Image (cartoon, grey):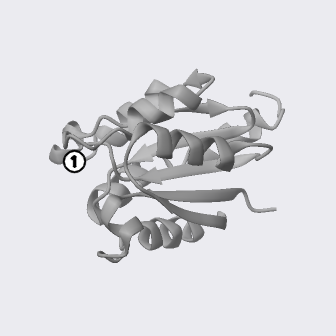
Amino acid sequence: MSPEAKILTVSDSVYAGTRRDGTGPAVSTALETHGFQVVDHQVTPDGVAAVSAALADLTTSFCGLVVTAGGTGFSPTDRTPEATRLVLEREAPGLAEAARSVSPLGRLSRGVAGTVGSALVINLPGSVTGAIESLEAVVDVLPHALELLAGGQPH
């Protein structure tokens, strides 16, 4: 059975309908290429309240991967990491560090990763290139992490 994934695009302009979401669909395609079944894709505006509420909803009773795309930079409205930390039970800094390490601009990402129940949450940058590069840096270990979260035995 394929691991399940949900995507949350974080963008005021995509939410308002003034810009097309290129990153969410690109992340979906990349996840499917790596054997994930994308079961939900939502869009929320920037901001701590909106993002934390969406993440709480997406992770409730869910055993799988939740990927956010956007809101990890230095813009005044970029608050995805702050919102994610409000929801996380345990951080997984190695995933965030690995995702940041793959490109020069990745060093500007403030994204975090961690767990909420049986869900693994990872913040990705909002650009298509940044999101895909960051995802590719960690995707190989995600099925094992999800297996462990579901109660599988460690090696």
Q: Nearer the viewer, residue 31 or 47?
A: 47
The quadrant in which residue 132 appears is bottom left
**Residue shown at 67%/32% (left/top)?**
116
Q: Nearer the viewer, residue 94 or 64?
A: 64
- Where, quadrant-wise, is the C terminus in this rendering? top right
Location of mark 1 (residue):
103
Disc 1 is placed on an element classified as loop
Q: x and y percent of residue 92 in the render?
A: 52, 27
Name the residue at the top extreme: 90
Residue 13 left/right relative to 114: left
Mark 1: amino acid: Ser
Tell me the residue at 30%/75% (across/down). Answer: 19
Is residue 86 rendered to the left or right of residue 5?
left
* In this rendering, position of residue 20 left or right of residue 6: left
Q: Is residue 144 visible?
A: no
Considering only vertical position in the picture, is 77 above or below 39? above
In the rendering, at what x and y percent does residue 70 appear? 35, 52
Q: Residue at x 43, y 44 (%)?
A: 123
